[in-house]
Image: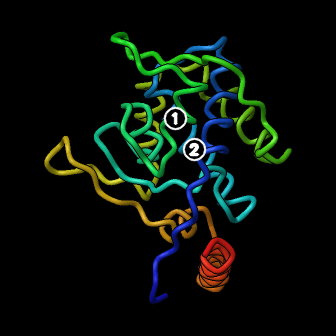
């Protein structure tokens, strides 16, 4: 595999996925827990659907794997012109590490399988302390402890796909499909 796999980030889907998890939790949640559940959901989607829900980039950080663009949005940073959309529906993190739902963005961007994955992830991990979930994610083979401790290490999509049981041929097919989708996006949006 000569080129890496990079899906297109879908801010609308990321907002709707985060909002769904927030709704399941009564409208607010510690952002660490949200980040862990979104990562786990994307990982399961890669296994089952061969594409993630959000299309985000992944990295290993001190408390486990993280969706880097969603984390930047939580911190109030501009990412792919998505901060206005994120901020419309999700309030910024508070001093107590919670974020909350401002208004419902709906779920029309999510397919039924993605909604089921998010619900299953919430039922399994949403009731746990976020640090317990972070510790659980340290057992995922693609996660590495960054050095220095407050840095980050990129996680490749191919590593995740390999770790969820995809063969080299399946991973190459997924890579080819993402290249074709990227090309078509560029041509159609030129």
Circle 2 packing at 10 Å, graded few (<14), some (14-19), many (20+), is: many
Identify the residue at image location x=46%, y=46%: 67
- Looking at marks 1 and 2 on the same chain, the residue that comes earlier in the sequence is marked by 2
Identify the residue at image location x=23%, y=50%: 146
Please tell me whether mark 1 sits on a helix, a strand or a loop: helix
Q: Residue 110: percent from the left, percent from the top? A: 77, 45
Q: Residue 145: percent from the left, percent from the top? A: 27, 49
Residue identifier under label 2 = 40
Identify the residue at image location x=57%, y=36%: 85
Q: Residue 12: percent from the left, percent from the top? A: 65, 43
Please tell me whether mark 2 sits on a helix, a strand or a loop: helix
Residue identifier under label 1 = 84
Q: CA distance from mark 1 to mark 2?
A: 25 Å
Identify the residue at image location x=55%, y=16%: 100
Give the quadrant of residue 17. Answer: top right
Q: Residue 2: percent from the left, percent from the top? A: 45, 89
Give the quadrant of residue 126. Answer: top right
Circle 1 packing at 10 Å, graded few (<14), some (14-19), many (20+), is: few
Q: Quadrant of the C terminus?
A: bottom right
Nearest the camera: 59 or 74? 74
Say whether residue 167 is visible: no
Q: Is residue 82 depicted above or below 94 in this figure? A: below
The answer to whether 1 appears left or right of 19 in the picture is left
């Amino acid at each position: 595999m000569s080129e890496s796999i990079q899906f297109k980030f879908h801010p609308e889907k990321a907002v709707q996925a985060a909002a769904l998890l927030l709704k399941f939790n009564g409208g607010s949640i510690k952002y660490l827990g949200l980040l862990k559940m979104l990562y786990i959901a994307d990982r399961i989607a890669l296994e089952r659907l061969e594409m993630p829900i959000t299309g985000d980039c992944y990295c290993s950080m001190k408390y486990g794997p993280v969706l880097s663009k969603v984390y930047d949005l939580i911190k109030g940073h501009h990412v792919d012109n998505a901060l206005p959309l994120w901020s419309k529906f999700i309030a910024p993190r508070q001093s107590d590490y919670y974020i909350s739902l401002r208004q419902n963005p709906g779920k029309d961007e999510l397919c039924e399988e993605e909604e089921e994955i998010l619900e299953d992830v919430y039922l399994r991990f949403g009731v746990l302390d976020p640090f317990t979930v972070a510790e659980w994610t340290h057992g995922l083979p693609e996660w590495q402890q960054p050095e220095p401790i407050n840095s980050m290490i990129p996680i490749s999509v191919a590593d995740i796909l390999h770790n969820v049981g995809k063969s080299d041929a399946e991973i190459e097919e997924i890579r080819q499909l993402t290249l074709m989708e990227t090309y078509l996006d560029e041509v159609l949006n030129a």
